[in-house]
Image: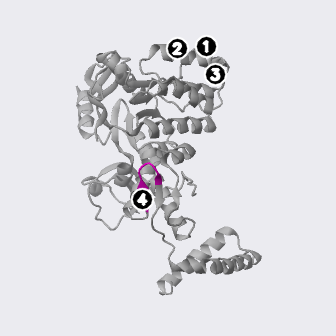
Amino acid sequence: MSTALETTSLGKRYGRLWALRDCFLQVPAGCVAALVGPNGAGKTTLLHLAVGLSRPTTGHVTVFGRTPRDGTAFLSMVGFLAQDHPLYRTFTVAEMLEMGHKLNPRWDASLAASRLQALTIPLEQKVGKLSGGQQSQVALALTLAKRPQILLLDEPLASLDPLARREFLQMLMTAVAEDGLTVLLSSHIITDLERVCDYLVILSGGRVQLAGEIDEISRRHKVLSGPRRDEEAVAAVHNVIEVNHTVRQTTLLVKVNGQLFDPSWDVHDVSLEDIVLAYLGQPPINDLAAGTRNHVEALV
Amino acid sequence: MITFRLDTRSGLAPYLQIVQQVRHALRLGLLDVGDQLPTIKDVVATLAINPNTVLKAYRDLEREGLIESRPGQGTFVTKTLAGPSIKSHAALRRSLDRWLKEALAAGLDEESITALFVDTLRHAAEEGVA
């Protein structure tokens, strides 16, 4: 499978603070990738670097082999929807469509109009008078009418109620089915992600904690439970992500490397949500090299 | 035509839920050879689900020889899982209905009924009856 978005030791520093660091990613073409992490994890920074809204301090990013420096050839390929789905509030929906038409070389006017009509959004209505859910749908329809090959969405679901969220995702998934477009969306709502996404990137503290296909991630992560004991024997072979001891029991969330042999552990499957929460609750322990480097820097 | 549902709390991967629902419908005779499955686009539009997930489920079913996708036409059932036992389903369902009424009359709630059924099934399996 070809790569849609690739970053190589990508980093961004604001003053003395690294917003993103040592970011290596290869997002396959045609997938719907979720970018998950707490506030301040570097999600928006990564998206802004990917679309060329800001310049990297280190490394570089390419989208289908092109960099943001490639100008219009790059821009016509990439769709980006910012967090607050920005629209001109005093424009009517029809005027927003007209603007999109004037500004974009590959604009598909009929597609945008038919999508909005299907949602019964009146084209003559002022954008500012629409509900939040409708505004997000207008913004998405505009972004899709540009016919991008990759669509980057910054927290598209955050401000939406459950119904609006469902309608937004229906429009997005239909577009993926019709156009085979690649999507990278950031979110801290984990529940919707499993039905929508097939690739996951977990960011925390400006670093990539985990990236991969969701099926593979689900398969590799297990919860082990058994009588209370030290986790060291397990940690020697597998990556222990989370440890819980009670008086009698030990429970480990583990990224399994190869086979689990010790029959004294009960092995359970674990939900994607629990996997994500485990990674977000931890310092970057799966990235041992980076952890060591941090430590060294702290000592110096 | 079959309509898929998605239970996000089941812990089962979405594509496996679709596979399971098709197999279930084939077993109960709700889907028969020649029946069409919903198009990927339809499933995507109703469930707001990733098209790759539906594609993966259909590929799995195709690999098992249960369905076949014909380019330009859609996806069709090629094999049923119902077997000859399907003829007895109606009579069995009626006696199960009677049994359920008895259980409800005896004061069992849905959870107790399920527990009793699953437990009996397991015992029967252990004794080699089922």
Q: Is residue A166 left or right of residue B50?
A: right
Q: Nearer the viewer, mark 4 or mark 2?
A: 4
- C-alpha gap between disc 4 and disc 1: 49 Å
Do callouts 4 and 2 point to residues on the same chain? no
Q: Quadrant of residue A42?
A: top left
Residue at which label 4 appears: B68
Mark 2 Cα shell of 10 Å, populated few (<14), some (14-19), many (≥20) = few
Q: Chain of mark 1?
A: A
Q: Counting residues from the N terminus, which is met first, the one under dot 1 or under dot 2?
A: 1
The quadrant in which the N terminus of chain A is found is top left
- C-alpha gap between disc 1 and disc 2: 10 Å
Report the residue at 29% width, 36% height from top. A3
Q: Quadrant of residue A164?
A: top right
Magenta region includes residue B71: yes
User: Is A5 above or below relative to A105?
Assistant: below
Q: Can you see residue A14? A: no
Looking at the image, which is closer to me, A274 or A3?
A: A3
Tell me the element at label 3.
Answer: loop
Report the residue at 56% width, 34% height from top. A168
Do callouts 1 and 2 point to residues on the same chain? yes
- C-alpha gap between disc 4 and disc 2: 45 Å
User: Is A184 above or below relative to B18?
Assistant: above
Please tell me the numbered disc located at residue A91.
1
